Amino acid sequence: MNTEARVGMFITAGLILLGGMILKLGDVSLKRTYPLRVSFSDVAGLPDKSVVKLSGVEVGKVRHISLDGDKAIVDIVINRGVEVYRDAHFRIGSTSIIGSKFLQIDQGHRSAGPLAAGEAIEGEVGQPLERLMADALKSVQGLLDELKGSLGQKGTLIQNLQASTQNMRDLTANMNDLMATVKPDLEHSLKKSSDVMDKLDQLLAKTNELAAKLNTSSGTVGALISDVEMKDNVKATVANFKDASASAKDALGRFGRFRFYWNATARNDPEARTTKGDIGLRIVPQEGKFYYIGASNLGTATDAPKTSDFETKNTIDAVLGWYGKWWEFYAGSLRSTFGLGGRLTPFPDTVFLKRFSLVGQAYDFGRNRTIFGHQLNNPDYDAGIEVQVQRYVRLGARVQDIAAATHYQTTANVLFEDKDIAYFFGLVSFSGGAKSK
């Protein structure tokens, strides 16, 4: 190959490389596309050349962002062959809490028909992450200020907590009235059970003595009962007495094992402009294990629906859980769907840091529905942090529904033990056990 041919090949390769770099650095695409124009009142830091995603799939690019009066105009291009329907929702998305921004399209319905090339659409604006975090921190600070000022002047949170506590007191007062009615019968039953236990012990001692005599065929009883079959029947009766006494002791021993806790949580959602309430009963039958049953997002049919609130009202929680010194795990029905969750206390042995816990849960794994035009087809993931500010009270902040419709909430939780209800359930358990015998 002569020198001229080599120089020509070198120049050709250089031009091809230069062209590729121009296409890459200039963000020039050879794909066939069509343009759309989306207007926002706030683009929340969306950069030029960011991607456009439809139902989580990249389908285009942001070409240019400009300002037209009080509106931010975002010019985008969509790949040919991808149809965006007229009732689709355009909003600013983020890959994570601190991740990069992109333009998210929530697909509409085929019956609405596709958007035409060059058509203008109005985008939906959510609150920027920085503002939401600032509002969340401001709400937490407000809660702390109210707690600090509770000694001198009762704030709204303290009044709400006192109202909730008063309702709990009313409930326990009714339980106390019930216990006052059944207490004489309970004491009588316990006294009788104690007498029964004493008599069972005496009877067991005598039957053991009788069994020994039967085995040796000594004494008057042994002489009278010489029949082998009769001797076996008496031995079986003695064994039944032993089993009955053991069962009675076990039933009585269960009285002191169960512990019951009322658990009430208030969740303030600034974006939905509402405060939600959860309440339930935590039952601890033994160390390291618990049951929880309750209701979440309590409300009435007359409550006005809010387009930014996607939680279903009046759902049921019923879970089985286990716990240790620094962890807790539970699974079962969360918000009337299957779910699981847990709590981690990273520093359980540090006086101050043991007050802080990380919490998280996931549920509604088969979710696929549209609420107020918002498509929800991902599980509901929640995560947050809580701090114990008092023996019965925890405050926290959490991110609700991370994968689909992110909301930031502040929480206040009250947890206290109810010994009266433990006595009541103990009586019911003992009565049921006695009947089953």
Image (cartoon, rainbow, N blue to C red):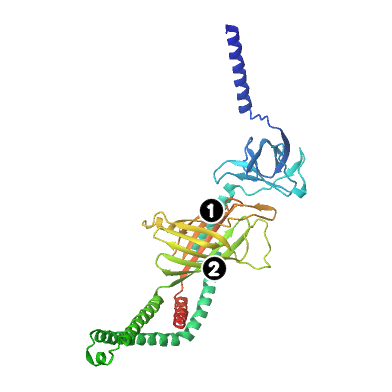
Compared with 200, 419 (above or below) is: above
Q: Nearer the viewer, residue 195 or 341?
A: 195
* Residue at x 55% of width, y 60% of height: 338
* Residue at x 41% of width, y 77% of height: 255
Secondary structure under badge 2? strand
State the mark number for residue 182.
none
Residue at which label 1 appears: 137
Left or right of 412, for residue 204: left
For marks 2 and 1, give the one nearer the viewer.
Answer: 2
* Residue at x 53% of width, y 64% of height: 265
> How many other residues sit within 10 Å of disc 1, few (<14), some (14-19) or many (≥20)?
some
Q: From where the camera sits, is residue 91 visible? A: yes
* Residue at x 60% of width, y 21% of height: 17
> How many other residues sit within 10 Å of disc 2, few (<14), some (14-19) or many (≥20)?
many
Give coordinates of residue 316: x percent, y percent: 57, 66
Residue at which label 2 appears: 294
Compared with 381, 80 (above or below) is: above
Q: Nearer the viewer, residue 175 or 16?
A: 16
Compared with 348, 284 (above or below) is: below
Question: What's the amino acid at mark 1?
Answer: Leu
The quadrant where residue 37 appears:
top right
- Of callouts 2 and 1, which one flags the residue occurring earlier in the amino acid sequence? 1
